[in-house]
Image (spheres, grey):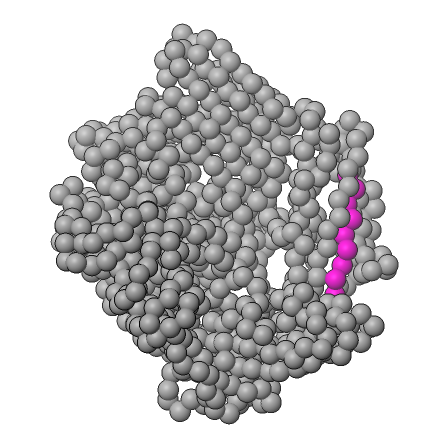
Amino acid sequence: MFRITEFKVEYRKVPIGLDIDKPRFSWTMTSSKQEVKQQEYRIRVRDQARLVWDSGICQSDVSHLIEYDGSCLEPLKSYQVSLEVSNNYGEKASSLSSFETGLMDYRNMKADWITVNSKGRDEIPIFRKTFKLKSEVAKARIYASALGVYELSLNDNKVGDSYFAPGWTCYHHRIQYQTYDVTEMLKETSKDYKLDITVANGWYKGIFGLESSPNNYGDRVASIAYVRVEYADGGIDEFGTDSSWSCFTGQTVTSEMYLGEHIDKTISETELGKVETYSYPKTVLIAQENEQVKITKRFKAIEKIVTPKGETVLDFGQNLTGFISCVLKQPKGTRITIKHAEVLDKEGNFYTENLRAAKPEDVFICSGEEDVFTPKFTFHGFRYIAIEGLIDAWGMKDFTACALHTDMEETGTFTCSNTKVNRLQQNIEWGQRSNFLDIPTDCPQRDERLGWTGDAQVFARTAAFNFNTALFFTKWLKDLAVEQTRKSGVPYVVPNILGEADAATGWGDAATIIPWTMYLVYGDKRILEHQYESMKNWVEYIHSKAQGPELWQQGFHFGDWVALDKEEGSDRVGATDVYFIASAFYAYSTSLLMETAKVLNKEEDATKYRQLYQRIIADFRDEYITKKGRLVSETQTGCILTLNFDLAEEKDRPRILKALVENLNRHDNHLVTGFLGTPYLCQTLTENGYHQLAGEVFLKEDYPSWLYTVNMGATTMWERWNSINPDRNFDESGMNSFNHYAYGAIGDWMYQKLAGIRLIEPAYKRFMIKPEPIHGITWVDASFTSVYGIIRSKWRFEKNIFSLDIEVPVNTEAEIWLIHSEKPVLVGSGSYHFEFVTGQSI
């Protein structure tokens, strides 16, 4: 049976609040037949009965990101979309969808920013408006935002299921507003309605950054909201925030992301002060661009522990980002304190020294009745909680750990015969879940939680296997471009609250590497179009630093961050020459810019940056490779980057590869690489004929290795290879997170090389299945949901019998490379099974 399985608008199902002039349509199809391709499609868009666009019958196999090309879309309007397709068997399928535009222009936000003068106090304001309905409601929307983080409620019921709106952006230039469908909450026409907007400090005003300083963007919280009600009889009511609103304080007394939240169920609302309109520009308002932060999983405690120090601790079995929700009945006035930690120390006591200045403690004051406590405006990184203050009986079931992150679609699965590798894959996924919280944070627990650009760029490819990151990175990259300057380049963190400092290699390269990665995975040229000037400005920034030869040999760099072959006297910078690394990434970013210019048909730029790239390569070879092919910085990372970025002449590659292999052998085939070398290590070995060595490095279980962390009980990725030493003591550098995703970049190699899922054309329109088994793993079962559908690779190699099962989505083609084969089998869509006896070993 041929059918359309998903029909999306701008990567979303039935979106509302779109502020895109030309939204794009994508769909996936399934069929019981093989070799199925779309032959034609037709899209029609209507505004009720009025046809606003008819694509006509298009003879095309394109089914992804088809751009709307009708009359101008109007704001605040619903559009219906119909899709018809036919395939090469003459079969037809159809589907319906819809989308709704948002404000489309900040001038359609019929409301004012409002704030309250709390006279130096730091209460959490609740802005309130009461209203009545005139008749039966057909459709109701609220368009809202805040300076701070906010929550909407109607008659004390939370509106929507998201957290930390409006998200973290470069607030002085971009603030998202959110669109809420409240039609079902306004069904009783005789009822009095109370709309509350509660606003906490959040990223805008709260204590944040490496110095734990407040007021990073402003010293007042504020809110803005526009309510529009369409009645069944055709009438419209609308109102917005203005000076007529009232303001109160409630039971949420204080809330800070680093310091936790204080909720007091014994207090009543009190009027806070007079509402004032606030002269903050509405021009910065933009529609929500990515998925919002939501509770995606909930965990019950698996064990109650009394530590040697006498602490009462609950273990939830998984390190995560979020908060604790609890249901308690305790005497009135009972003060419950919940502290959060990622690990216990080797004696089994609660360990929080790695949190530095952060003190993630939630305080709940009980009413005497059954109370439900759920924080609204804070989050913690934790596996364990320590509970203080309980008086009456309670149980583990009363506490639930709520995991929060950007609600991206899960797209990847990977399991194999090695249970420790399976736990590693889970750790990689949980590192991503924990840190893809509106922006790609480095860690979720200590006094940091910033959008470090280096962490994001090394992990972007793996991230896109595990989850659909198209919207997530589209939004964040726009902030990167805004924060980027000609003087300082790309900042270390985005959004940037650290101040201006000269950019660093490997970190600033997020400007080129991530857009290109997103284009490859999703085939989305619009990402490249949006980011092209940023990509270009980044390469030109480095070019401005080159003095004489086209090499970057000045300024501060993080280098191969927290590598084990440390620079003399350094705790954190690896031994690889930082300017060697800087020049290598200069070449790589220039090559990506050159390729982007080609894709966007910018021929003049493509020629210009090809010539620049050639000069960089020539100067790199003169400076860092001797006439006999020896690297000046012959470390693991030096060899890896030179080989992976194709910086050496062909005649010199064997010697550099030999140096890499010998370096690994000197370390008993253990890696000593840091943030910039590790992502390419196994990939470089595999692509240069040393796949089994890559497998040996990958499957090492002693320190330092990926599986060492698994053996030490990790449930997320660590910041350092020795975050916990073999003697179970902690690294005491003052920089030790147990939930950092950067080293999870190995996931890319697991999907591409072990499972063999590799793209040939952008968006996996054409791809290959080329699994490469290693000693120690007898089977792999992996899948990836591409924009065309599910790609699956499942292989088993036992007793000289190799079997392979694959799935190829409709409208795509695949090259199937069986082990030891010299040419691929070409197939179209469908399910296939291959099995044969081979006399050769892995």
Quarter containing the N terminus: top right
Does the magenta-highlighted stretch encompass residue 81? yes
Position of 134 with respect to 560 (left or right) is: right
- Assign the C terminus to one quadrant of the image: top left
Q: Is residue 532 visible?
A: no
Q: Is residue 835 visible?
A: yes
Residue that appears at 38% across and 73% down: 368
639 drawn magenta: no
Q: Residue 698: where, in percent of width, then height?
A: 31, 32
Q: Position of residue 401 (x, y in %)?
A: 39, 55
> Residue 650 location in percent, x, y?
37, 30
Residue 493, above or below 654:
below
Which one is in front, 186 or 414? 186
Query: Residue 653 appears in which quarter of the rendering?
Result: top left
Q: Measuring from the top left, give residue 485's x and y in whole percent.
A: 44, 67
The magenta segment: 76-85
